[in-house]
Amino acid sequence: MSKVEVNQISSQCGSTLTIGQSGDTVTLACGATQSGFGRTGTVDWDTTAKTASFTAVSGNGYFVNTTSGAVTMTMPSGSAGAIVSIQDYNKTFDTNALTISPASGEKINGGSTDGSLVISTEGQGLTFVYVDSTVGWKTIHENEFISGGNNFIVATGGTITCCGDYKIHTFTGPGTFCVTSAGNPLGSTAVDYLVVAGGGGSGGPAGNTNGGGGGGGFRFYASPSCNPQSGPGAPLNGPAAIPVTVQGYPITVGSGGSGGASGCKGSDSSFSTITSTGGGFGANPGGPLSEQGGPGGSGGGGGGGGGTNNAGGTGNTPPVSPPQGNAGGNSAQTTPDHASGGGGGATAAGFAGRTTPSPANSGTGGAGAGITGFGSSNGECSSCVQYFSGGGGGGQASPVPLGGGAGGIGGGRPAGAPPGNDGLVNTGGGGGGGRCAAIPGAGGAGGSGIVIIRYKFQ
């Protein structure tokens, strides 16, 4: 096959000009342009990504980079057969949209005259051909490329922050952790996790003191290569990270158990194969377990009444390894001071009520667990220890000076005077017991849980 330069004209007959022979390749000289050759549905791609608003040229394709902000592309004046393509440069259209505007007086896909099209789908690509004045620019091809050749996990969902080479997804309510790229062993293929259930609520007054609510179940894994755990939560580090695949993982964030006349168990939190159990309720005289604290991730404190020493609820129920929590404290029966137990926490059991030395005192809530590198409850990157799943303090009684128990570190709340204090939001802390007898007060509600997922992304 021969190669014929543009200046070699094979023949000319009237207005017909023939360049080259059958089987030849026609090449334009350097710097020359062509017109009237028509198109076959393809475009010439401009590989310099557009980062600011621009006007498209027919026959061109554009990679549009909206990482730093939204971009507007104005279409050229339409003529039959004109073609323009666009493609999301780095999957950021969902963050900052691309707006496509027709030339004055024209349409896109038969819409309103001068009506713009907003592209806000991650990885979106479109090709337009101008048909006529009725339809205007018609979409003839659409694609959505999200996954890429990535060594690291790529995911969406929750509140996303970064801490060094790690990305953190924080869920303070239900949602979906959606993995769009599973990575590979050269980067990352598994995620660290923190799953905290809702704390237990404390019962209300019925003539004697009320046990503190148990902290919500606490389960986590932190890879040794990132923020090795040396704080009070270290013994609870799970056995392994969770491998992920390209799919959506539903997230459940447990609510705290209600307080009041009868305390309630907190709700469970879950991610993938990990479920943390809600904290047990703090017992109240006449409660559902004959004044014994309720079982749960950590158990609720025993209620101070009924003429007996009442047991705190069992923790780590159902059992997992390492344990997700501890038992609530027992009450201590004495007249007229009825000292209730504190709710259990992630790293310590609730303290029992004591009768000596006088005056008697209700038990303190068990301590929660502290970890670093997962951010605080709002997902901030922090080297400070963050605490979760503390037990609520046992309720204060009358006659004063019987003291109420303090809340355990990690969201557990102290007894109230008269009402118990609610566990802190998104910590899984147990509710504090309410005051009873002469100045009655309802028990506090448990704090809601939290789920945090962390993985290496670069």
Image: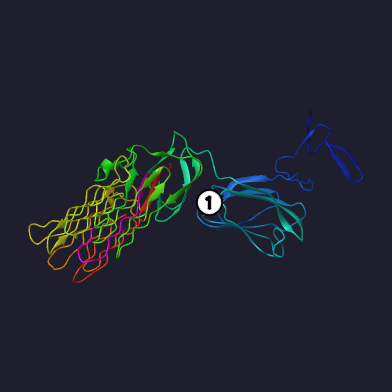
Residue at 8% in and 57% down: 356
Majority SS type along the magenta span:
loop
Screen quadrant of the N terminus: top right
Disc 1 designates what residue? 92
Most foreground residue, 63 or 299: 299
Q: Is residue 297 left or right of residue 86?
A: left
Quadrant of the rendered image containing residue 94: bottom right
Q: What kind of element bears circle 1? A: loop
Question: For the residue carrying disc 1, how many other residues have a C-alpha within 10 Å: few (<14), some (14-19), or many (20+)?
Answer: many
Q: Is residue 164 left or right of residue 432?
A: right
Most foreground residue, 415 or 56: 415
Most foreground residue, 365 or 223: 365
Q: Is residue 229 visible?
A: no
| First to last magenta residue range | 193-211
Number of labelled discs? 1
Screen quadrant of the C terminus: top left
Rendering coords of residue 95 (x, y %)? 51, 55
Rendering coords of residue 344 (x, y %)? 24, 51
Q: Is 9 included in the stretch rendered in magenta?
A: no
Rendering coords of residue 153 (x, y %)? 46, 41
What kind of residue is marked 1?
Answer: Thr
Quadrant of the rendered image containing residue 254: bottom left
Rendering coords of residue 334 (x, y %)? 12, 60
Quadrant of the rendered image containing residue 403: bottom left
Q: State the scheme by which the image is colored.
A: rainbow
User: Is the residue 309 above or below the residue 419 in the image?
Assistant: above
